[in-house]
Image: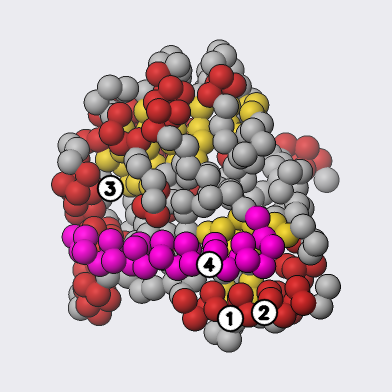
Amino acid sequence: MKWEESVRRVVPYVAGEQPNRRDIIKLNTNECPYPPAPGVAKLAAGMDSGAFRRYPDPDASILTDALAEYYHVDPQQVFVGVGSDDVLAMAFLTFFNSGRPILFPDVTYSFYDVWANLYRIPYQMKPLDENWHIRPQDYRQPNGGVIFPNPNAPTGVLESLDTVEEIVRENRDSVVIVDEAYVDFGGASALAFLERYDNLLVVQTFSKSRAMAGMRIGFCIGSRKLIGYLKDVKFSFNSYTLNLPAQMLGAEAVRDDRYFKDITAKIIATRERVKKELKDMGFTFPDSMANFIFATHQKAPAARLFRDLKEADIYVRHWDKPRISDYLRITVGTDGEMDALLAFLKDDLDKL
C-alpha cells in the first residue's frame, strides 16, 4: 500500500503479561502485593459525580501540592503524568532534541530505546560492568542527554549518590534524568541534589511503593525552568492527561506516610528473606534494592524455569536478550506468594 511508506514504524515496548485470572501468583510486573493506603479506598467510595463529569485541573494542583509538601519543594518544581512512562515520554520529547546521541545503560528499562526510536533520537547504550554497575567515565562525552534508572531495572542494583552526582556534574550541558521507580525500597534519592543542579530531573511513580499501578500516576521533580518546559510540551499535546480521581486519590496516598513506610518495610523484609532462601537453592543474583530479585541458576536454564513456573500458574519475567537471557526477574509478593514460589522452585530443581 502506498500510504504505508509514510507510516512511522517502531518496534513497540512489550509489557509483562497481565493474565485475566485470579488463581495465579503474579510476580512478573513489579506491582505492589498490598492494597493502597486505607484512605484511598474510602475516598474512592465517596466520590461524587463531579470527579467524573468535569475536566480535571490541567496543573493537577491537588496532587502537585501534596507532592511538593511531602518532598519539601515548590509546587512549580513538580510535574505529574499518567504513570512515570508518560512523564518520561514527555521528558524525551522535551529535552532530547540536540541531534547528539543520548546515553543510557545497555541493561536497563526497555522503554528507553523505544522512545528514542519513536522520536527519532540518536542514542548509545553504555555497557554496565561485570557487577551490573554503571561506569561513570562512560558518560563523560558530548551527548544530547543522559537517562538511567536507580535502582536499575531489571537488575535491582543501586548506584551510590556519589556516582549519581558525578554523572550529573559532568553533564551540566545536558539534561540528566534519574528514573527512581524503585528508590523507596532501599535507595537514597537524587532529590538531594536539586538545589545544586538545574539540569537534573528525578522521576518517580505511584505504581510500586504506593500500590496504585492501576491508577497510572507518575511524577517528576526538577528545577522550575525544567518543569516549565515540560508543561509547555504537555499543554501542547494534551492538557488533561491525568484524570481528577487519580489526582485526588494520589494526594490521599501521599498524606498517609505511615502506611507507605509500613508496606515498603514489609516488602523489604520479605525480599531479604527470599534472597537467603534462593541463595541456599543455588541461585545467584545482584544485591537488589528494589521490589524484585534478578536471579540466575547455574544448573537450571532461566527459559526452562520460566516455562515450568508459568505452567504452575506462577508468573515471573524473562527476556531473551544479550547478557540477561539466563536471568529471571521475580517480583517480591506477599510472604505466602513467595513461599509458594520457593516451594515450587525447590521441587523443580530437585528433578534436575
Horizontal side of 48 relative to 284 (left or right) equals: left
Q: Cβ–Cβ below 8 Å for labels 4 and 3?
A: no
Residue located beneath label 2 in the image: 344
Residue located beneath label 4 in the image: 274
Task: Measuring from the top left, give residue 17's x and y in whole percent.
Answer: 63, 67
Give me the C-alpha separation between circle 4 and circle 2. Answer: 13 Å
Q: Earlier in the sequence, mark 2 or mark 3?
A: 3
The answer to which image quadrant residue 245 occupies is bottom left
Seen in the picture, residue 139 relative to 32 is either above or below; the reply is above
Mark nearest the camera among 3 and 1 is: 1
Horizontal side of 278 relative to 82 (left or right) equals: right
Task: Measuring from the top left, give residue 65's x and y in whole percent.
Answer: 18, 48
- State which quarter of the image contains the N terminus: top right
Q: Earlier in the sequence, mark 3 or mark 1?
A: 3
Q: Which residues are magenta?
A: 255-284
Identify the residue shown where x is 62% and y is 39%.
131
Look at the magenta stretch and give its main secondary structure: helix
124 inside magenta stretch: no
The answer to which image quadrant residue 72 occupies is top left
Q: Earlier in the sequence, mark 1 or mark 4?
A: 4
Point out which mark residue 340 bears: 1
Task: Measuring from the top left, give residue 186's x and y in whole percent.
Answer: 39, 51
Tag 4: residue type? Val
